[in-house]
Image (spheres, grey):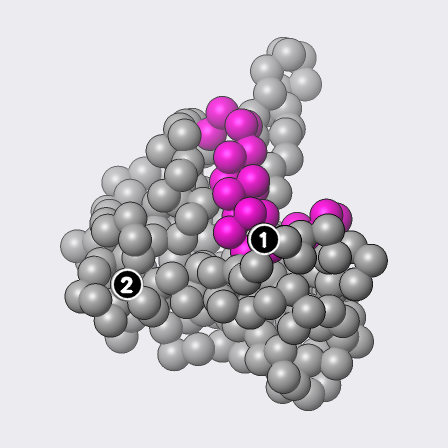
Amino acid sequence: MTRWGMVIDLRKCIGCETCKHVCDYANLVPPGANWRRVVSYSMDKGLDLQQYLSMGCMHCSDPPCLEVCPTGATYRRPDGIIDINQELCIGCGACILACPYKARSINYEDKISWKENIGQGTDGRKNSDRIGVCTKCDFCLSRLEAGLKKGLKPGSDPEATPCCVRYCIGEALYFGDLDDTASEVSKLIRENRTSCLNEELQTHPCVFYIF
């Protein structure tokens, strides 16, 4: 069984925010929404040393956002990706409150009209389709599926790989099948000390960090 996931090597992240900007452009993410963001933090309060943390939806195996969705719009696919059926989403915001990673946003018309000239996002949806519903990172799902139909390997073939991973300047982001022991993400997890954010919440994210 395929289980898509990501490994982020914080030793390589330079805080350039290319992952965020590429995601914003490719997915028509409106201002104020956080499909992907980069936050800075200090490893040692005694040193003026900044580290950077690239964050998005963690595609949890036990996602709290799913449990609170009143319409079933949020669902977990067999491949582990947490997606939103925007035809069912009523924009209530319950999932936004439930997500401990602040990875979800509701789009409003006054925040989205400025990108009308760009056209469609990677999922083929127009801006007007997204007004009043919740959106978030979906690992560039339509891009991934289109690549698979061509026989490409996500994580290895750029055309089938999430935009943030493909264009990371520091090559800090990796994507692949966590259940494939031969995949690069599985090897990185085996060979390095990794952890997930907020492990105490037991949401079991599919995004791992190398510190």
Residue 148 percent coordinates (x, y): 25, 67
Give the residue at x 60% y 67%.
126
**Of helix, strand and loop, which one carries label 1?**
loop
Q: Seen in the image, is 199 located left or right of residue 45?
A: left
Residue at the limit of the structure toward the top, as seen here: 47
Give the residue at x 60% y 61%.
136
The CA span between labels 1 and 2 is 23 Å
On screen, 103 above or below 88?
Answer: above
Figure disc tally: 2
* Residue 92 visible within the image: yes
* Closer to viewer: mark 1 or mark 2: 1
Image quarter in which the C terminus is found = top left
Residue 209 percent coordinates (x, y): 45, 43
**Of helix, strand and loop, which one carries label 2?**
helix
Q: Which residue is mark 1?
A: 118
Residue 200 or 58: which is nearer the viewer? 58
Q: Seen in the image, is 98 located left or right of residue 53?
A: right
* Mark 1: amino acid: Ile
Residue 185 percent coordinates (x, y): 30, 49
Residue at the limit of the structure toward the right, as seen here: 110
Q: Quadrant of residue 182?
A: bottom left
Give the residue at x 22% y 58%.
153
Query: Marks 2 and 1: in contact by CB < 8 Å?
Result: no
Q: Seen in the image, is 139 located left or right of residue 148?
A: right
* Mark 2: amino acid: Gly
Magenta-highlighted residues:
13-34
Give the residue at x 44% y 77%.
77
How crowded pointer 2 is (Cα within 10 Å; few <14, some 14-19, many 20+) is rated as some
